[in-house]
Amino acid sequence: MSLLLTIVTANAAAEATPALDPEEVENGRAIYEQYCASCHGAKAEGAPGWREQNELGELPAPPHDPEGHTWRHSDADLYAMISKGWRDPFNKTDRLTMPPFGDILTHEEIKDVIAYLKSLWTEEQRQYQREESLEEPFPAETTKSSMEKEHQ
């Protein structure tokens, strides 16, 4: 009976959401405070009225805490949104309502911001997001020279 318990416990541990790296979370928090909090809120609570389109027909910055929907996106999607910027598909304008940060933040800094966001979610939300990311993980780090070669 104890062998069965050991196997079940080992399988449950393997499926559990991995712990976040405290250093990555702390680095991400500092970057978030510098670049993201002015729009998404100091506590990732989102802009006031974030569910309602403004006078331009755009949705204000959403929350990244458990009340928002950020946790529903894979690591690849979140990375792309931060790196390349974002235009909410429900917006009536064509402009990016979130600017791209790919030229400002490094690959690791973007991943750290995402680690910080993950630290704000519930265990169930983190598990859901982890499962979404299995098929869409973070992109591999690219250097400017490799990116330049891709565009030639």
Image (spheres, rainbow, N blue to C red):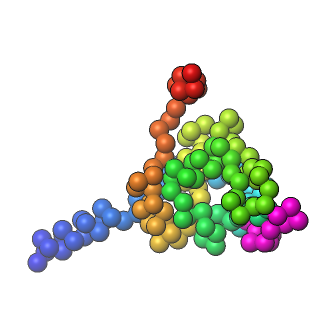
- The structure residue drawn at horizontal position 68% and vertical position 51%, both measured from the top left corner, is 86
Look at the picture and state if 26 lies above or below 50: above
Instruction: Tell me the magenta residue range.
Output: 46-57
As drawn, which residue projects farthest toward the bottom? 1
Pick the residue in front: 150 or 79: 150
Residue 99 visible, this orientation: yes
Q: Position of residue 80 (x, y in %)?
A: 59, 47
Q: Position of residue 40 (x, y in %)?
A: 73, 60
In this picture, residue 26 sits left or right of residue 124 = right
As drawn, which residue projects farthest toward the right? 55
Q: Position of residue 45 (x, y in %)?
A: 71, 67
The chief SS type of the magenta part is loop
Pick the residue in front: 28 or 90: 90
In this picture, residue 24 sits left or right of residue 53 = left
Look at the picture and state if 101 lies above or below 53: above
Quarter placement of the N terminus: bottom left
Q: Is residue 56 magenta?
A: yes
In this picture, residue 29 sits left or right of residue 98 = left
- The structure residue drawn at horizontal position 30% and vertical position 62%, both measured from the top left corner, is 14
Quarter placement of the C terminus: top right
In this picture, residue 76 sits left or right of residue 6 = right
Look at the picture and state if 48 lies above or below 23: below
Q: Is residue 84 magenta?
A: no
- The structure residue drawn at horizontal position 55% and vertical position 40%, both measured from the top left corner, is 108
